[in-house]
Amino acid sequence: PGSPNLEPGDRQVTATWAAPANDGTPVTKYTAELSGPQGIVSREVAGTTIVFSGLQNGAGYTVRVRAHNSATPPEGGAWSGASRQAIPAGLPGTPEVGASRVDTPLGGQIRATWTTPDANGSAITGYTVVAQSSGHPTLTYQAGGGETETIFSSVVNGADYTISVTAKNTVGAGSAGVSAPTSTFAPPGAPGG
């Protein structure tokens, strides 16, 4: 058979390949061999697709296959070429999120901070940071993959805000981490007299 195509998933890869010409003797099964950091794993399959699961996200894997029919020796025919390397990955983890008011003369600022969660096999490409308060406009900031804080400078004084942060990688967006509510206020002005 030709070299397999690999499709990575979360802790798995799916290998597919084209059936070889059989010259009158049908293929009875295939042996697919996975190579990766845990060594080599061989499995037999009747069709031209196999899923290898329980893999390590972020590690590289290749697969090669060989066909069996009544004309091949017991170990099967010649091996295909190895597939291109595939790297399984899943959605990133959930960041821990904090929020605190920023002391400024006019108030209206909240600092959002978050931890870098587990990337789960694919580098974190960015974060969506959202400040929400009931009855007030929602504020959104798109942070880069290396950022871990931002300041929202147009929050409403005296309103409770929660901050949610969602990490993104090439697979998609993970679950949002959410802060405890926090508010900001402006100190009172000097009394008139």
Image: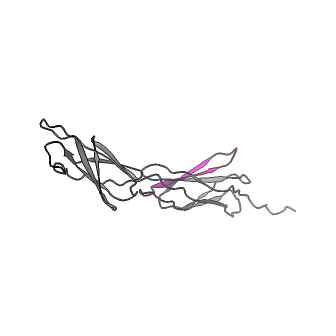
Q: Say which of 149 and 26 sits in front.
A: 26
Instruction: Tell me where residue 129 appears, x and y as whole percent.
Output: 56, 53
Name the colouring of the figure. one colour
Q: Please provide the residue range marked out in magenta.
A: 116-141
Q: Say which of 124 and 93 sits in front.
A: 93
**Along the horizontal axis of the image, is 12 left or right of 148?**
left
> Which quadrant does the N terminus fall into?
top left
Q: Is residue 128 magenta?
A: yes
Q: Say which of 171 and 135 sits in front.
A: 171
Q: Residue at x 51, y 60 (%)?
A: 117
Residue 113 shows in this picture: yes
> Which quadrant does the C terminus fall into?
bottom right
Q: Residue at x 20, y 45 (%)?
A: 67
Name the main secondary structure of what is drawn in magenta.
loop
Residue 2 shows in this picture: no
Instruction: Tell me where residue 92 appears, x and y as whole percent.
Output: 48, 54
Q: Is residue 44 magenta?
A: no
Instruction: Tell me where residue 43 appears, x and y as whole percent.
Output: 29, 50
Q: Report the number of discs.
A: 0
Instruction: Tell me where residue 55 appears, x and y as whole percent.
Output: 38, 55
- Looking at the image, is 47 positioned above or below residue 55? above
